[in-house]
Amino acid sequence: MQILICVKQVPDDSIEIRLDKASNKPNLSGVSMVANAFDTYALELAVRFMEANGGIVSVLTVGAEDASNTLKNCLAVGAKEAYSVQDPLYADLDGLSAASVLAAAINKIEQDRGQKFDLILCGQESTDEITGQVGPMLAEKLGTSFVSRAIAVNLKDSALEVNQETEEGYNVVSIETPSVVTVSKPDYDPRYPTIKTKMASRKAVIPTYTAAEIGAEVQAKVRYNEYVEPPKKEAGIKILEKDVTLAVSAATEQMKKDKAI
């Protein structure tokens, strides 16, 4: 089974990001770029599948910035191959243009390696833009089947079964390959690299393609006009009554005053 993970490089979401007052854009100075969290879930799912059933797990990233460190981190936790598409033209991709570039890159990589991918995994959404659009658009561009919100992929009688997360539990969906699947958060966390795998990944040579080489000189059709920080929470109201009955009465009156009830 040949599995490809589409990995997006995003700002580290463990760090609070504020708007730059001069440009009114997110201030990313000093913020590390890391693999999107949902993409790391997809990678862990794929590596576990490979360990159980065999195959090769590859990773691909697209963008304007160098993503070699992010890809080498993916290699350190189980991926066997890594590919990068880097071009200044890809600085501000929207969902549709990102899917178009990924589709062109996948076709080029398959041509170069002489083998097609059976399963293409994407994170359910990215932590920076949270649109959840690229996966289904990529499936449309590639002309494959598509399943969203996967929490498990299993091999059964030479076919793939996907556990698709729902509010009540999950659906079991049988798919034919090639297919694109977006991954939600499984019941386990991504593994950590070891010193040995980290050292090995540093030596990896990652093929890098330009927009001209993959034949996808696209531009975004959607632009962000303005960024607005979420409003700060107002301080709550303290009920100082020590008597329980009086405290409940005061709280009720305050909620009526605020039209909360």
Image: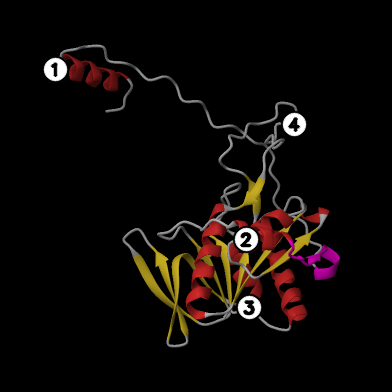
Residue located beneath label 2 in the image? 196
Q: Amino acid at mark 3?
A: Phe
Instruction: Say which mark, if any, is on residue 173.
Output: none
- Category of crowding for the residue at label 2, using alpha-carbon neighbours closer than 10 angstroms: few (below 14), some (14–19), many (at least 20): few
Quarter in which the N terminus is drawn? bottom right
Mark with earlier residue (3, 2): 3
Q: Residue placed farthest to the right in the image?
A: 212
Numbered disc in front, either 3 or 1: 3
Q: What is the secondary structure assignment of the residue under circle 1?
A: helix
Q: What is the secondary structure assignment of the residue under circle 2?
A: helix
- Whether residue 7 is visible here, answered yes or no, is no
Q: Residue 165 appears in which quarter of the rendering?
A: bottom left
Numbered disc in front, either 2 or 4: 2
Q: Position of residue 225 (x, y in %)?
A: 69, 40
Q: Amino acid at mark 1?
A: Thr
Mark with earlier residue (3, 1): 3
Q: Indicate whether 59 appears above or below 261.
A: below
Instruction: Say which mark, if any, is on residue 23.
Output: 4
Q: Indicate whether 120 appears above or below 20.
A: below
Quarter in which the C terminus is drawn? top left
Q: Which residues are magenta?
A: 203-215
Report the number of numbered marks. Answer: 4
Mark with earlier residue (4, 3): 4
Mark with earlier residue (2, 4): 4
- Whether residue 64 is visible here, answered yes or no, is yes
Residue located beneath label 3 in the image? 117
Q: What is the secondary structure assignment of the residue under circle 3?
A: loop
Q: Position of residue 33 (x, y in %)?
A: 67, 47
Q: Amino acid at mark 2?
A: Lys
